[in-house]
Image (cartoon, grey):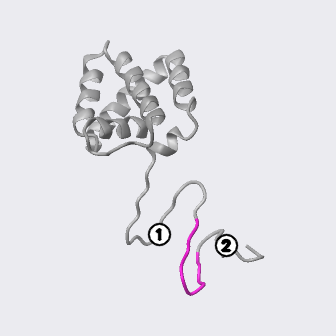
Amino acid sequence: MPLLVRYAEHLAGLVGNVADEAITGRLRAVWSAVANRFRSDSQAEGALNRLGVAPGDTRRQAAVEGHLDDLLREDESFARALAELVNATPGLTKAATQITVTNAGAVAIGGSLRIHGSGGSTAGRDVGTGGPNS
């Protein structure tokens, strides 16, 4: 879903160059694959078109996600083809993922996280300071 939202933002002019033309091309291919499959379902097609106009609208994202989830469960060959398309370009999912945290207390992010600060204090579960024992 983040890939579709990222490309919808690109279509709506809300972001500039996604990363490079190769990434933009892959995002376009994912969008086109989904759009082509949604053509047989007017509600799904309408949901995707509305997402293209307002990609930040979480209700529109949820509508497309619901239709896409149903489609992927019903059509395993399309699910495999879409997964291959997404995985064909290294870094594609990273290009579509952006996390911004401002003035937050506790934050959980999957993957690795580096915290740099002053004072030398850290707290939390499985937190290391970068020293020899961490």
Q: Can residue 116 be found in the magenta stretch? A: yes
Could you give the CA–CA distance between mark 2 and mark 1, rounded to whole angstroms?
A: 16 Å
Above or below, 54 against 104 in this view is above
Tell me the crowding category of disc 2: few under 14, some 14 to 19, or many 20 or more residues within 10 angstroms, Cα based: some
Q: Amino acid at mark 1?
A: Ala
- Main secondary structure along the magenta-highlighted residues: loop
Quadrant housing residue 121:
bottom right
Q: Which residue is mark 2?
A: 128
Q: Amino acid at mark 2?
A: Gly
Q: Nearer the viewer, residue 117 or 43?
A: 117
Quadrant housing residue 53:
top left
Q: Position of residue 127 (x, y in %)?
A: 64, 71
| Residue that appears at 32% across and 38% down | 10
Residue range corresponding to the magenta coloring: 114-123
Q: Earlier in the sequence, mark 2 or mark 1?
A: 1
* Quadrant (top left/top right/bottom left/bottom right) for the C terminus: bottom right
